[in-house]
C-alpha cells in the first residue's frame, strides 16, 4: 500500500511539474525531471522517467516527447489558454476601472498562472501598466456576487448608497436609510457595473452604480414582475456611452456645482484633487483632450460646469458657440 501511495504521489507531482514548467519551446530533459522531483522530496531514477510518462499517457494525461540530440525530452503542450489569450485577459483587467489596484494585482497573478510557470514569467515581463483610474471600493466583488444571486433567485436586494465629497468622504443618500429594490440585471457600462432594477418607491426602472453601494444584502422577499426585463431593453440601456477622444491634450480648470461632484469623479478618477470654491461649488485641475466631444460634454451641464482656465481655451469655446448660433 505504501509503495502504491508513493507511486500515486510521484505521478501527481510529475504531472504538475510538466504542466507548470514545460512546453514545446522549453521541454524538460530526463535529468531536469529527476532534479525537480528530488526538490520535492521524491526519489527518481533516470530509467524510470520514460515508464512514468507512458503511464501518464495511458491515464489520459497528454505528455509529448521528442529527441534533442541523443537525449529525450518531455513537455505538455495542450493548455486551456494560449499566451495571447491570457495577455488579452490581463490587459482587459488592467484597463477595467471598477477593479481596484489591490484586486487587479491578485487577479493578474491568477490569470498568469493559468499558462504555467514559464509562460507566467513571459506574461509578467510583458505587462503594460495602463494609466487607468481605479475605483477604491474593495467591497464591489462581494456586492456583485450578492446582486447576481438576487437576480438569479428573483429576490429583492437592499443596500446603502453614497456619493463622495471633495475630501473623498462617503456622503450617504436618504440620510443613510437603506434602498430596497427589485434587481433586474447587472450591466457593464462606461467601465462601471450598474444594477438595473425596479424601484417600487419611484414606480420605474432605475440604475445604481455598484461601486457606490455598501452593505449589499439579498432579501427573502420575491422581486416583482416589473423587474423581469426582456434582453432588448437591457441591451438598449448599455448603449448609453460617451468619450472625449480625438483632440489636443490640455490642462484645464473646471468649476462645477456640488451636484456634479460624482460626475467629475466618474470621469477623472477618485484620486482627483478637488478644491472647495464656495458653499455651492468646487474646482479641479484636469488634463483632457480638447475636441468637439469634450465641449459637448461640458455644454450638456448648462452652465453648472464651466472651463475657467486657460483664457485662450475659453476664447476658442466662445468662438465655437458664436459659430453655432450664426
Image (spheres, rainbow, N blue to C red):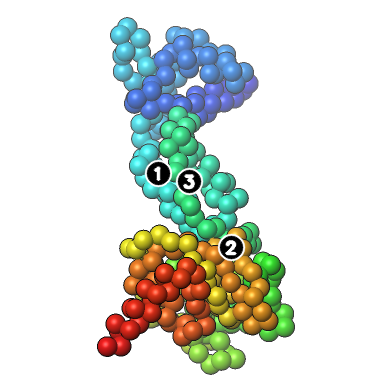
Cα distance in 3D space between marks 2 and 1: 30 Å
Q: Which x, y percent locates residue 25?
A: 34, 25
The front one of 56 and 16 is: 16
- Residue 5 against residue 319 in the figure, above or below: above
- Mark sitting on residue 87: 1
| Residue depth check, mark 2 versus mark 1: number of the one nearer the observer | 2
Question: Which picture quadrant has residue 171?
Answer: bottom right
Question: Pointers 2 and 1 in contact (CB under 8 A)?
Answer: no
181 to the left or right of 132: right
Quarter of the figure with the N terminus:
top right
Q: Nearer the viewer, residue 304 or 22?
A: 304
Mark 2 closeness class: few <14, some 14–19, many ≥20 residues within 10 Å: some
The circle drawn on residue 245 is none
Is residue 247 found left or right of 185 in the rendered image? left
Task: For mark 2, give the secondary structure.
Answer: loop
Count how many numbered circles sit on residues in the image.
3
Residue 272 is tagged as 2
Which of the marked residues, 3 or 1, is nearer the chain's N terminus?
1
The residue beneath circle 3 is 129
Q: Quadrant of residue 174?
A: bottom right
Q: Secondary structure at mark 3?
A: loop
Can you give x and y, in whole percent of width and height, for residue 300 in the image?
A: 43, 82
User: Which comes before the other along the chain, label 2 or label 3?
Assistant: 3
Q: From mark 3 to mark 1, how far is it between C-alphas?
A: 12 Å
Q: Nearer the viewer, residue 134 or 146?
A: 134
Q: Residue at x 48, y 46 (%)?
A: 129
Disc 2 from disc 3: Cα separation: 19 Å
At horizontal 33% and vertical 84% (from top left) the residue drawn is 322
Amino acid at each position: 500500500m505504501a509503495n502504491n501511495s508513493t507511486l500515486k504521489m510521484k505521478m501527481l507531482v510529475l504531472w504538475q511539474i510538466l504542466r507548470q514548467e514545460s512546453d514545446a519551446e522549453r521541454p524538460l530533459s530526463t535529468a531536469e525531471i529527476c532534479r525537480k522531483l528530488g526538490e520535492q522530496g521524491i526519489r527518481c531514477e533516470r530509467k524510470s522517467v520514460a515508464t512514468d510518462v507512458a503511464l501518464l499517457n495511458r491515464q489520459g494525461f497528454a505528455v509529448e516527447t521528442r529527441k534533442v540530440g541523443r537525449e529525450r525530452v518531455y513537455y505538455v503542450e495542450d493548455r486551456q489558454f494560449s499566451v495571447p489569450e491570457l495577455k488579452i485577459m490581463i490587459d482587459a483587467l488592467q484597463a477595467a476601472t471598477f477593479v481596484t489596484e489591490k484586486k487587479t494585482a491578485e487577479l493578474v497573478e491568477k490569470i498568469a498562472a493559468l499558462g504555467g510557470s514559464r509562460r507566467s514569467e513571459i506574461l509578467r515581463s510583458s505587462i503594460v501598466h495602463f494609466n487607468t483610474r481605479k475605483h477604491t471600493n474593495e467591497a464591489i466583488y462581494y456586492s456583485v456576487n450578492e446582486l447576481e444571486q438576487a437576480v438569479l433567485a428573483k429576490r429583492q436586494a437592499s443596500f446603502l448608497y453614497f456619493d463622495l465629497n471633495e475630501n473623498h468622504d462617503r456622503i450617504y443618500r436618504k440620510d443613510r436609510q437603506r434602498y430596497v429594490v427589485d434587481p433586474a440585471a447587472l450591466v457593464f457600462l462606461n467601465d462601471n457595473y450598474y444594477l438595473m432594477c425596479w424601484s417600487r418607491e419611484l414606480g420605474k426602472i432605475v440604475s445604481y452604480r455598484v461601486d457606490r453601494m455598501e452593505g449589499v444584502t439579498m432579501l427573502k422577499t420575491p422581486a416583482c414582475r416589473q423587474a423581469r426585463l426582456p434582453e432588448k431593453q437591457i441591451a438598449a440601456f448599455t448603449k448609453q456611452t460617451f468619450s472625449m477622444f480625438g483632440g489636443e491634450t490640455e490642462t484645464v480648470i473646471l468649476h462645477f456645482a456640488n451636484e456634479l461632484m460624482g460626475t467629475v469623479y466618474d470621469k477623472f478618477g477618485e484620486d482627483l484633487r478637488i478644491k472647495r470654491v464656495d458653499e455651492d461649488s468646487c474646482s479641479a485641475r484636469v488634463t483632457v483632450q480638447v475636441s468637439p466631444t469634450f465641449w459637448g460634454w461640458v455644454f450638456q451641464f448648462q452652465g453648472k460646469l464651466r472651463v475657467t482656465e486657460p483664457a485662450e481655451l475659453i476664447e476658442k469655446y466662445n468662438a465655437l458657440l458664436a459659430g453655432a448660433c450664426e
